[in-house]
Image (tube, rainbow, N blue to C red):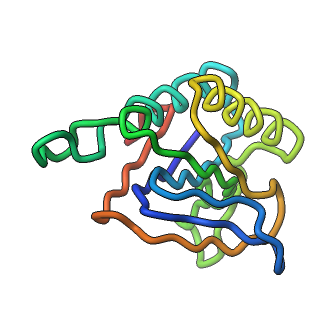
Amino acid sequence: MRAVVQRVTEARVLVGDRRAGEIGRGLLVLVGIGRDDGPDDVRYVAGKIRDARIFEGDAGKPMDRSVVDVGGAVLVVSQFTLYGDIRKGRRPAFDAAAPPGPARALYEELVRELRAVPLPVATGEFQAMMRVELVNDGPVTILIDSARQF
């Protein structure tokens, strides 16, 4: 499982003209589910999102507090293209991405794990074409990979 985590002052996701999810201060998480991912990957990624100290702390100390510590929210958006492989040719291959059925189940499990923290969690719409709008804070962008490739 791969996640691109961005610290934001606000973010929203639209499906057509409909606002599917929106948050204020917190984290925008673009998540891709790999073919070999399972529940352990969900727990690993959820824990990293929950505990990552990427917000400013007291007295301006950088990278000192987590999204939980600052009372932030999380916007989770599925993005299978995180498993795009463009090493051969010019068109990405998505062979390493999980098929839609298993991917949806793990995506929903990740959302449940984060809500159980408890964290306010908004979502995009799985398998939909979406427009994501965000205001980066920093910018701070962190990559998480449950296979620990980076």
| 44 vs 77: above or below | above
Query: Residue at the location (82% across, 34% down)?
Result: 105
Image quarter hosting the C terminus: top left
Query: Residue at the location (30% across, 44% down)?
Result: 54
Provide residue 132's location: percent of width, then percent of height: 63, 71
Which residue is at the front of the view, 60 or 27?
Answer: 60
| 18 vs 24: above or below | below
Query: Residue at the location (57% across, 34% down)?
Result: 119
Extreme-top residue of the structure: 40
| 86 vs 149: above or below | below
Provide residue 19's location: percent of width, then percent of height: 76, 69
Whether residue 6 sits left or right of residue 91 in the image: it is left
Whether residue 58 sits left or right of residue 22 in the image: it is left
Quadrant position of residue 18: bottom right
Provide residue 77's location: percent of width, then percent of height: 66, 55
Number of marks in the image? 0
Query: Residue at the location (39% across, 29% down)?
Result: 51
Which residue is at the front of the view, 148 or 14?
Answer: 14
